[in-house]
Amino acid sequence: MALYTTIHLHNVPAGREAEYAAWFDGPHRAALSRLRGFITTDRYEVTPEQVMPDIPQPWRFVSIYDFDLPSPEIDVPALGPLVAEARDTGLVANDETERLYTYRLFGDWKASPNWRRSEPLSGVSIILGNYVIGRYAEYQKWYEEVHSVEVINVPGHVAMKRGELSPVQIEPRHYCPGDQFVLCAQQTDDLLFTIKDFSARARGVSPSGVAMQPRSASGSFARTVHYFRKVSGAKFWPGGIAYAGDLSVYPGKG
C-alpha cells in the first residue's frame, strides 16, 4: 500500500457554485466511498491572501483526494469517471484551466505543535515545485530536515506532506509545471498574519525573532504557490459567495 494524493484544480461556471457544492458533498462523496483505498476528500477556494501575490491564480477551487492504494496503476484512474460527472454536466467551467494531477506521497502529515487535531483545517497551501537537475537528494534532505520544520512552525501553519508526480495520471492529461508537490495545512482565522510572518521569517525580520535558514540552491525557482480556504460543507449565497457556520459573523447576512 502507498499514499497518493490527487488534486483537481478547476473553476465553476458563475451561478452554479451551490450546485457544484451539493454534488461534491452529496453523490460525489457517496461514490468516492466505494473506491478501493479511498481515505478522504475536501474542497477549497482560493484566498485573496497569497504569499507570492504576483503569481497567477487561474483556479478558484481545488478538490484534494487522498488514497492508500494497493495498485495505483489500477486504482488511480478509477477517480476519473467520478470527476467527469461534474465536467459532463457543465459544473466545471470550459475555460481551458482544469487540471488533474496525482502525486505519490513520501509520507503522511508531518505535524507541528501548532496542530489542534480535534479541530478542522481552515485551509491549505499548495506548491507545485521542482528541484535543480542533479540535486534531487540535496533538495529532499533540505526540505525534510530543514524547510518543512521551519514552515509548519509558523503560527497558523500546522502540518505538511510532500510527494512527487506519479507515473500514473488521470485523463484528461495536461503538462504539469511541478514534479514536486508540497501540501501545507492551516488552522487560523488570520491567514494574512500567517503569510506575513512566514515571509518575515524567510527574510529574517520576524518580530518573533525566528529566522529561517537561507533557501537551498537545490530548489528550483520554477514553482507556483497557491493558498486556499476550506469550503467543503459550506453553503453559497447568490453570486457564488461561500459561507459556513454562524451567520452572525458575516455582516449583513445574519
Image: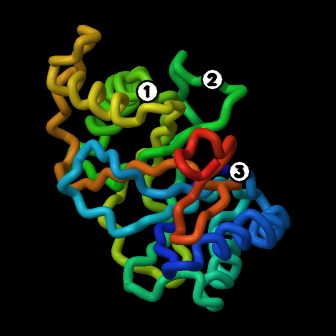
Viewer-nearest of labels 2 and 1? 2
Q: Is residue 15 visible?
A: yes
For disc 1, the neighbor class at 10 Å (few under 14, some 14 to 19, many from 20) is many
The residue pinned by badge 2 equals 116
User: Residues at badges 3 and 2 in contact (C-beta under 8 Å)?
Assistant: no
Q: Which sits earlier in the primary sequence, circle 2 or circle 1?
A: 2
Q: Which sits earlier in the primary sequence, circle 3 or circle 2?
A: 3
Viewer-proximal residue, 37 or 253? Answer: 253
Residue drawn at 51 percent across, 21 percent down: 112
Which residue sits furthest top?
209
Check disc 3 and report its element: helix, strand or loop. Answer: loop
Amino acid at circle 1: Ile
Q: How is the image coloured?
A: rainbow
Residue 165 location in percent, x, y?
44, 60
Check disc 1 and report its element: helix, strand or loop. Answer: helix
Up-down relation of residue 195 to residue 84 (above or below): above
Count of numbered badges drawn on the protein: 3
- The image's mark for residue 152 is 1
Q: CA distance from mark 3 to mark 1?
A: 27 Å
Amino acid at circle 3: Met
The residue pinned by badge 3 equals 1
